Image (tube, rainbow, N blue to C red):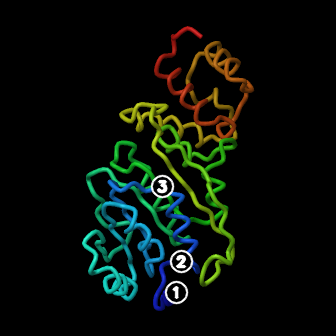
Amino acid sequence: MAAQPRGRRADGQHFLRSQRLADELVAAACVLPAELVVEVGAGSGRLTAPLRRAARRVIAVELDPGLAAGLERRFGRHPTVAVLRGDMLDVPFPREPFRVVGNVPFGATTALLRRLFDDPRGPITRADLIVQDGLARKRTSPRPCSMLALSWLPWWQIGVERHLPAACFQPPPAVDGAMLVARRRTSPLIDPTDAGRYRALLGRAFNRAQSPVRHTLGLPPRRWKALARERGLAVDARPPQLDVWDWAAAFQAVRQPNRPS
């Protein structure tokens, strides 16, 4: 069993206790031998070791200098592992297609998710991330759905695949963790080139989240009523009451307001 890491930890960083659990999590991620993996928050290398065996190449990102030095000592002889000292929010990501795997410091989770998912045209193909359980549930709720989650979901399928009790970690956090998995949609619900316009529509609606959606879409009343009826929505539905498929349909209706129902 590897020694527990010491030294400065990133905000909200909690390390997996068990190498067996780490092996199991990587096996469940189904990493392919041809894939490039960026591991965020590599820590002491619990996930790095099975990732090295599974992937073509691993870039292990770690902010803490002591932990990064330990990773270099442990994996420096392996040509398929590169240790990158730096902040996962700032380090350059590969331009070729890659996956992200990691045990994310809880305090940095939302910022990392923004970096990974805000650009629907980026090279990321999938993300398997250990995050705070409550945040995972919030970001994966289909309805009510947050504006932030809706800004990603036309291009990503995001779900919780495993609950991880606090006792799985050292030091144990005050809350449980979860495995959040994001897979790129084979057929996006909205063209990635329309991401800015779609998110602008979301912004207008959620700025008046307590007002009916019909007040912010700008559709003719008859067109909105027809759309709401075909989707089973209340005429006065509020923004969080629409799921991502409803929002995709609303966006297309706004783009083509005269399309027959």
Could you tell me which secondary element the residue under label 1 belongs to? Answer: loop
Could you tell me which secondary element the residue under label 3 belongs to? Answer: loop
Q: Amino acid at mark 1?
A: Met
Question: Which residue is located at x 49 percent, y 31 percent?
Answer: 189
Looking at the image, which is closer to me, 46 or 238? Answer: 46
Q: Amino acid at mark 2?
A: Gln
Q: Earlier in the sequence, mark 2 or mark 3?
A: 2
Q: Quadrant of residue 249?
A: top right
Q: Are marks 2 and 3 in contact (CB under 8 Å)?
A: no
Looking at the image, which is closer to me, 66 or 240? Answer: 66
Q: Quadrant of residue 212?
A: top right
Mark 1 — residue?
Answer: 1
Residue 256 location in percent, x, y?
Answer: 47, 17
Q: Residues within 10 Å of mark 1 (few under 14, many from 20)?
A: few
Quadrant of the drawing holding the C terminus: top right
Looking at the image, which is closer to me, 58 or 175? Answer: 58
Question: Which residue is located at x 43 percent, y 34 percent?
Answer: 197
Q: Amino acid at mark 3?
A: Cys
Q: Are marks 2 and 1 in contact (CB under 8 Å)?
A: yes
Could you tell me how far apart the alpha carbons at marks 3 and 1 are, in whole angstroms? 24 Å
**Residue most toward the top?**
260
Question: Which residue is located at x 65 percent, y 34 percent?
Answer: 242
Residue 232 location in percent, x, y?
Answer: 72, 24
Could you tell me how far apart the alpha carbons at marks 2 and 1 are, in whole angstroms? 7 Å
Q: Quadrant of residue 145?
A: top right
Could you tell me how far apart the alpha carbons at marks 2 and 3 are, in whole angstroms? 17 Å
Mark 2 — residue?
Answer: 19
Mark 3 — residue?
Answer: 30
Q: Are marks 3 and 1 in contact (CB under 8 Å)?
A: no
